C-alpha cells in the first residue's frame, strides 16, 4: 500500500514537473522562436504624410526700367510683397502657394542691356549679367516707348528665366506706387502661370493621389501623353526598311543624336538619366495596309488606322530586359516601292505636315518618303541619304511631349521666344521640375501609406531592418522635399523627391514581403496541432487527474471532521 502511494506521488510530481517545464520554458521559447520579426516603422510620421499639405514658394523679382516709375514712386522702391493662396484638392490634400515679389529699379548695366535692338538680344545680355536661380523669375517692366516689343505684344518671354512687360504711360502717371503695382499684378500673375507653375499643372501632377476633375483639358491631355516620372529612360531610334532590295538607306543617327537630342537630354539631366541606342530593321512592314487615294495620287493612312500600326511593329523592336526603365521608341519608316508615297491624314482628312504621329507613353513614328529618288532609268537599290535635320526636328518635338514638356498656348499679347538649340528653355525646365517634384511626392506618399496599411492589416508579414531603413529613408526624404518646396529651393526639392520615390518603391517591392513568405493562421494550426497535441493531451489529462484527486482528499478530510 505504501509502495503504491509512493508511485502515485512520484507520478504526480513528474506530471507537474513536465507541465512546469512546458509552461515556464517551452511556451516562451516556442513563442520567441516563432514570432514574426517586425522592425520599428515611423508610423506616426507616415500618418502625417497621408494628410498631404504641400507648400510651394516662388520668388519673383520685378525690375522697373527708366521711364516706368515717377520720381515719387521710385522713392518707395525697393519693396517686397508676399501673396498667399490656398486650395483644397480633396479631404486629404491641400495646396498652398506663396509668391514673394521683390520690386526694384534697374541698374545701369541692365539699362544698357534693355537698349539692345531686339528682345532676344536683350534677354541674352540680361542673362549674362546675372543668372537667376532655378525656380525664380525676373520680370523687367519697360516703358511704352521701348522698341524691344512689337506694337501688338505686351509681354515677351525669353529663353531664360526672364520676361519683359510693357507698361503704358496712363498706368503710372498720377498714381501711387501701390496703385501701379495693383494694375501690374494681373500681368505678373499671368507670367508666373506661364513660366513657373499653375494650379492646374500641380493638380494634374497629383494624379496618383486625387482624381481628375473637369478643368483644363490641355493639361490633362499633356499629362496622359507624357511618361510617368522615372529615375531613368531608355530611348531607342529604329530605322524600318521593309524593302531593302529597292532602298539602300544611310542615316547618320550618331551624329544627329549628338547634334539635336543630346543638348536636350543634358539639360534634362537633373530630372532623370537617359540612355540611347539605335537599330535598323529590314523587311518590317506596318500592321495596316495603306489605301490608295486617287485624289492625292498617293497612299494614305487615316487617323483611325494609326492605332493598329504599333502592335505588329513593336513585336519586332525587341526590349531591353536588363533595365526596368521606361522605353521611348522613335521609328523612321521608309515605305516600300509598292506603297510609295505614303502620307498620314488626320481626322479631317487633311495631310499631317510632319507626316508623323506619336502614341502616348510609347513613342513616335515618322513616315519618310523617298519616291523623289525614283526616275525612268533608276537602278535599284536606290541609295538614299536621309535628311536627319528634318527627321530629328520631328523626333525632338515628340520627345518633348513624351517627357512632359507642355505645349502652351500663351495668352493674348504674349510672345514666347523659340527654345533655342538646346530644345528647352530654362523656364520650361523649371516648369517641368515643379510638376515632377510634386508628382514624385504624391507617388511616394501613396506608396508609403499603402505599405503601412498593408503591414498593419497583416501582422504576419516580416518587416526586416532593410525595409524599415528604406521606409525611414523615404519618410525623411519626403519631409526634406516638402521643406525645400516651401522655401522655394526647387533643385533640392526635386533631388529629395527622387530619393523618396526610389526608397519607397524599393521597400514596397522588397521580395521578403511576398505573400508566400508568411503563413496564415489556418496554416499555422495545421502545422502545430500534429506536433503539440500528442504531447499536450497526456499532460493535460495528468493535470486533470491530479486536480480531481486533490478535491477528493479535501472532501474526505471534511467528512472525517464532521
Image (spheres, helix red, strand yellow):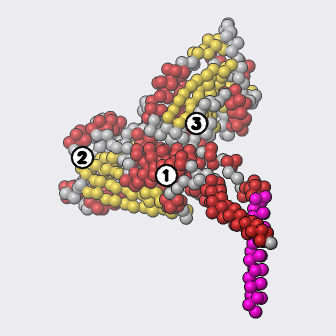
Image location of residue 510, percent across then percent down: 60, 45
Q: Residues within 10 Å of mark 2 (few under 14, many from 20)?
A: some
Query: Quick check: 477 left or right of 121?
Result: right
Front-most of 244 and 14?
Answer: 14
Front-most of 559 and 160?
Answer: 559
- Mark 2–mark 3 Cα distance, whole angstroms, equals 47 Å
| For residue 463, above or below residue 47 | above
Residue lying at 67% horizontally and 39% vertically, measured from the top left: 348
Q: Quadrant of the N terminus?
A: bottom right
Image location of residue 532, percent across then percent down: 74, 58
Q: Main secondary structure of the magenta part?
A: helix
Task: Single out the mark in the foreground, 2 or 3.
Answer: 3
In the rendered structure, which disc, 2 or 3, sits on the residue that comes first in sequence?
A: 2
| For residue 204, above or below residue 117 | below
Front-most of 76 and 519?
Answer: 519
| Secondary element at tag 3 | loop
In the rendered structure, which disc, 3 or 1, sits on the residue that comes first in sequence?
A: 3
Residue receiving disc 2: 106
- Residue 466 within the segment the image draws in magenta: no
Task: Single out the mark in the foreground, 1 or 2.
Answer: 1
| Secondary element at tag 2 | loop
The label number, if any, that marks residue 325 in the structure image: 3
Q: Residues within 10 Å of mark 3 (few under 14, many from 20)?
A: some
Q: Quadrant of the C terminus?
A: bottom right
The segment highlighted magenta reads 533-562
Residue receiving disc 1: 472
Amino acid at each position: 500500500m505504501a509502495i503504491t502511494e509512493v508511485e502515485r506521488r512520484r507520478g504526480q510530481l513528474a506530471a507537474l514537473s513536465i507541465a512546469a517545464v512546458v509552461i515556464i520554458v517551452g511556451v516562451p521559447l516556442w513563442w520567441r522562436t516563432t514570432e514574426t520579426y517586425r522592425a520599428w516603422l515611423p508610423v506616426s510620421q507616415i500618418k502625417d504624410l497621408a494628410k498631404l499639405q504641400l507648400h510651394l514658394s516662388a520668388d519673383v523679382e520685378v525690375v522697373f526700367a527708366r521711364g516706368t516709375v515717377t520720381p515719387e514712386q521710385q522713392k518707395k522702391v525697393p519693396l517686397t510683397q508676399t501673396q498667399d493662396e490656398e486650395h483644397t484638392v480633396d479631404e486629404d490634400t491641400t495646396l498652398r502657394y506663396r509668391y514673394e515679389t521683390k520690386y526694384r529699379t534697374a541698374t545701369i548695366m541692365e539699362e544698357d542691356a534693355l537698349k539692345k535692338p531686339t528682345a532676344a538680344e536683350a534677354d541674352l545680355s540680361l542673362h549674362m549679367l546675372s543668372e537667376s536661380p532655378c525656380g525664380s523669375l525676373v520680370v523687367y517692366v519697360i516703358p511704352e516707348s521701348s522698341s524691344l516689343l512689337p506694337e501688338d505684344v505686351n509681354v515677351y518671354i525669353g529663353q531664360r528665366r526672364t520676361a519683359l512687360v510693357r507698361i503704358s504711360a496712363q498706368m503710372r502717371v498720377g498714381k501711387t506706387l501701390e496703385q501701379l503695382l495693383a494694375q501690374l499684378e494681373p500681368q505678373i500673375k499671368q507670367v508666373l502661370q506661364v513660366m513657373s507653375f499653375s494650379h492646374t499643372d500641380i493638380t494634374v501632377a497629383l494624379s496618383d493621389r486625387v482624381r481628375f476633375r473637369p478643368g483644363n483639358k490641355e493639361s490633362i491631355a499633356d499629362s496622359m501623353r507624357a511618361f510617368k516620372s522615372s529615375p531613368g529612360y531608355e530611348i531607342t531610334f529604329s530605322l524600318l526598311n521593309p524593302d531593302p532590295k529597292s532602298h539602300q538607306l544611310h542615316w547618320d543617327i550618331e551624329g544627329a543624336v549628338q547634334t539635336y537630342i543630346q543638348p536636350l537630354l543634358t539639360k534634362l539631366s537633373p530630372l532623370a538619366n537617359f540612355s540611347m541606342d539605335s537599330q535598323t530593321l529590314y523587311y518590317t512592314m506596318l500592321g495596316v495596309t495603306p489605301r490608295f487615294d486617287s485624289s492625292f495620287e498617293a497612299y494614305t493612312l487615316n487617323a483611325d488606322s494609326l492605332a493598329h500600326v504599333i502592335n505588329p511593329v513593336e513585336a519586332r523592336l525587341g526590349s531591353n530586359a536588363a533595365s526596368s526603365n521606361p522605353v521611348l521608341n522613335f521609328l523612321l519608316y521608309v515605305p516600300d516601292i509598292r506603297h510609295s508615297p505614303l502620307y498620314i491624314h488626320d481626322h479631317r482628312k487633311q495631310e499631317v505636315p510632319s507626316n508623323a504621329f506619336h502614341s502616348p507613353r510609347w513613342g513616335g513614328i515618322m513616315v519618310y518618303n523617298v519616291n523623289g529618288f525614283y526616275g525612268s532609268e533608276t537602278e535599284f537599290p536606290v541609295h538614299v541619304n536621309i535628311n536627319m535635320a528634318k527627321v530629328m526636328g520631328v523626333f525632338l518635338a515628340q520627345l518633348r511631349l513624351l517627357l512632359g514638356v507642355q505645349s502652351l498656348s500663351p495668352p493674348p499679347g504674349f510672345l514666347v521666344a523659340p527654345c533655342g538649340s538646346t530644345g528647352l528653355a530654362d523656364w520650361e525646365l523649371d516648369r517641368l521640375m515643379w510638376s515632377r517634384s510634386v508628382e514624385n511626392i504624391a507617388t511616394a506618399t501613396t506608396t508609403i501609406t499603402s505599405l503601412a496599411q498593408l503591414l498593419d492589416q497583416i501582422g504576419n508579414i516580416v518587416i526586416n531592418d532593410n525595409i524599415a531603413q528604406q521606409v525611414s529613408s523615404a519618410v525623411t526624404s519626403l519631409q526634406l522635399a516638402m521643406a525645400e518646396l516651401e522655401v522655394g529651393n526647387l533643385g533640392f526639392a526635386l533631388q529629395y523627391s527622387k530619393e523618396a520615390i526610389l526608397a519607397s518603391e524599393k521597400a514596397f517591392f522588397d521580395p521578403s514581403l511576398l505573400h508566400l513568405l508568411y503563413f496564415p493562421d489556418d496554416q499555422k494550426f495545421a502545422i502545430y496541432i500534429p506536433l503539440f497535441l500528442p504531447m499536450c493531451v497526456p499532460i493535460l489529462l495528468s493535470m486533470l487527474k491530479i486536480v480531481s484527486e486533490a478535491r477528493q482528499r479535501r472532501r474526505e478530510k471534511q467528512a472525517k471532521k464532521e
